[in-house]
Image (spheres, rainbow, N blue to C red):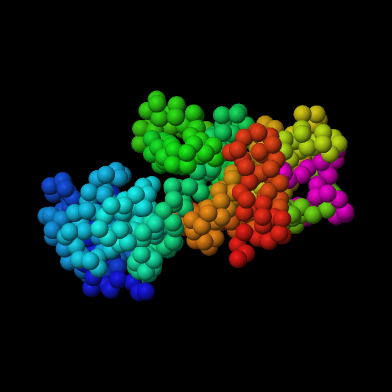
């Protein structure tokens, strides 16, 4: 199956930001594009806006002036749906309303040729339900772009129960020819991205609600240790809490109230108050001109540490050894259970248990736990927590060691799996469940999360780096700590851990 030839006409219905963006993408790829909107003059206005976007690209040296004129000439407003009769592909980007979209497709079936592909840009509605009752449900597919469409690489190609696999392959090839990174997904609630991404927001919201740390600290940890471009609070402020909360509620309802997707009361309160984020001037952060951005909390130590002992295998945290040595710390390596001894303190990577619980179970005095990092060689910040009986001296010794290695250190309350580990574990767990249920391939799930929401590493690849068994242990301990189904491990993760295989293994 090949991509649509550039001689094929592409029609876009809906001249809002998303529709205009999709029209720009298709025109830049070489297609003649008809843009239709029910509001008089909206399509022409959107085309003018696209031309201004193209002019900015010319100013930046990213587009030639002659190319701008050619691309702009490909865009034409349509005065009726009937004007779209010759289109080979129609992409609707109207309001997220099932009945309205279905009515539109019913009209298009009688207008467009039998070979025309009818695609929806829906981000949440079932393609199976959209196609149900239509004369030719096999040609209804999803082509979910991300906003802004000209800049965001990902396109989810969504197949409903009746969708023709050959047409899905053609849309995939077409998106690829348009310079996008397409992925195939079944039509399940949230598709890939809006499903798998829910824990990114949910776990930070829960940590805030439990008083583990403040917004600025949790955001800084996800950025500076986890490698994410933004933390959950600054990202939801950017998205808009009305939008983000509504998506969470939609996914929660679609999965019949599965607690994995439970909406946050903290976020609901912001929505109820009208504190929607940047667009309202206030969300988790204050965006008024005079407001000062709160800084993440850090702790420091007056001590100087010259040596430590590493006992056993640190697993994914093994690069810490090299970082400590490069900082001038004398590291003695010996057999053990995967801990670092420094002064009177014992430091270990979290396994999902409370520090106090682990200290009691293993009979360890002065136990401190540290959090996951994307790359322990380069991470700027690290989170730690302490068991209840940990002395001030032991805490200072650990902080001094981590400071010596160049980390900024943030102390969280004694909370299961800390911040980054908890978030990544839940992202990987949701991705594993999506893989188990055949929503998409492992490669497409990881690509979707990297290209669609800029994750530093695909959640399944991250799970394989941590190790399925270690991740399973973390989730089992989280579930035991909360006694909630929210943290139940995916059957696929448990299976792969038992088999000693990775999630990317076929």
The residue depicted at 72 percent of the width and 60 percent of the height is 500
Q: Left or right of 285: which side holds 149?
A: left
Vertical placement of residue 458 versus 305, above or below: below
Q: Which residues are magenta?
A: 324-352
Q: Left or right of 96: which side holds 39?
A: left
Q: Residue furthest right?
A: 334
Labels in figure, total: 0
Corner quadrant of residue 20: bottom left
**Residue 343 inside the magenta-drawn segment:** yes
The residue depicted at 11 percent of the width and 55 percent of the height is 79
Name the spot of residue 74 as percent of width and height, x first: 20, 66
**Residue 383 inside the magenta-drawn segment:** no
Q: Quadrant of the N terminus?
A: bottom left
Residue 130 visible within the image: yes
Name the foreground residue: 469 vs 26: 469
Name the spot of residue 405 as percent of width and height, x first: 72, 49
Q: Left or right of 72: which side holds 398?
A: right
Name the foreground residue: 91 vs 16: 91
Name the spot of residue 473 as percent of width and height, x first: 71, 46
Corner quadrant of residue 391: top right
The residue depicted at 24 percent of the width and 45 percent of the height is 100
Name the foreground residue: 320 vs 152: 152
The residue depicted at 81 percent of the width and 44 percent of the height is 305
Q: Left or right of 253: which side holds 57?
A: left
Residue 226 visible within the image: no
Name the spot of residue 128 as percent of width and height, x first: 36, 53
Vertical placement of residue 2 versus 119, above or below: below
Corner quadrant of residue 417: top right
Q: Quadrant of the C terminus?
A: bottom right
């Amino acid at each position: 199956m090949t991509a649509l030839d550039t001689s094929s006409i592409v029609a876009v219905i809906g001249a809002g930001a998303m529709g205009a963006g999709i029209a720009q993408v298709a025109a830049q790829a070489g297609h003649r594009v008809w843009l239709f909107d029910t509001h008089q003059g909206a399509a022409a206005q959107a085309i003018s806006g696209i031309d201004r976007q193209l002019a900015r690209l010319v100013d930046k040296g990213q587009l030639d002036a002659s190319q701008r004129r050619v691309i702009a000439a490909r865009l034409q407003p349509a005065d009726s749906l009937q004007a779209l009769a010759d289109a080979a592909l129609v992409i609707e980007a109207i309001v997220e309303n099932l009945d309205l979209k279905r009515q539109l497709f019913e009209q298009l079936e009688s207008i467009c040729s039998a070979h025309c592909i009818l695609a929806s840009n829906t981000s949440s509605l079932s393609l199976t339900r959209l196609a149900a009752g239509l004369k030719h449900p096999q040609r209804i597919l999803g082509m979910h772009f991300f906003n802004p469409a000209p800049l965001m690489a990902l396109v989810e190609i969504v197949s409903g129960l009746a969708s023709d696999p050959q047409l899905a392959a053609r849309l995939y090839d077409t998106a690829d020819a348009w310079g996008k990174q397409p992925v195939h997904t079944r039509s399940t609630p949230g598709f890939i991205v809006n499903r798998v991404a829910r824990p990114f927001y949910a776990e930070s919201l829960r940590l805030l609600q439990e008083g583990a740390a403040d917004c600025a600290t949790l955001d800084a940890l996800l950025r500076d240790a986890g490698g994410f471009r933004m933390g959950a609070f600054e990202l939801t402020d950017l998205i808009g809490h009305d939008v983000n909360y509504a998506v969470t509620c939609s996914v929660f309802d679609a999965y019949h109230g599965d607690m994995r997707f439970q909406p946050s009361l903290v976020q609901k309160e912001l929505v109820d108050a009208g504190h929607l984020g940047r667009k309202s001037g206030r969300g988790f952060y204050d965006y008024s001109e005079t407001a000062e951005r709160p800084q993440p909390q850090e702790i420091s130590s007056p001590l100087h540490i010259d040596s430590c002992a590493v006992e056993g295998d640190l697993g994914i945290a093994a690069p810490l050894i090299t970082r400590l040595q490069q900082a001038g710390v004398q590291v003695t390596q010996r057999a053990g259970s995967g801990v670092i001894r420094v002064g009177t303190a014992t430091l270990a990577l979290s396994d999902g248990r409370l520090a106090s619980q682990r200290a009691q179970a293993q009979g360890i005095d002065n136990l401190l736990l540290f959090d996951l990092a994307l790359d322990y060689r380069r991470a700027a910040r690290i989170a730690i927590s302490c068991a209840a009986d940990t002395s001030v001296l032991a805490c200072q010794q650990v902080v001094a060691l981590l400071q010596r290695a160049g980390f900024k250190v943030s102390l969280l309350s004694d909370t299961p799996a800390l911040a980054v580990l908890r978030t990544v574990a839940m992202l990987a767990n949701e991705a594993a469940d999506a893989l188990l249920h055949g929503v998409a391939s492992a490669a497409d799930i990881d690509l979707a999360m990297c290209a669609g929401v800029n994750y530093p590493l695909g959640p399944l690849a991250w799970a394989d780096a941590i190790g399925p068994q270690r991740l399973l242990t973390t989730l089992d301990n989280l579930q035991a700590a909360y006694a909630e189904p929210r943290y139940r491990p995916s059957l696929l993760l448990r299976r792969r851990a038992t088999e000693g295989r990775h999630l990317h293994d076929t």
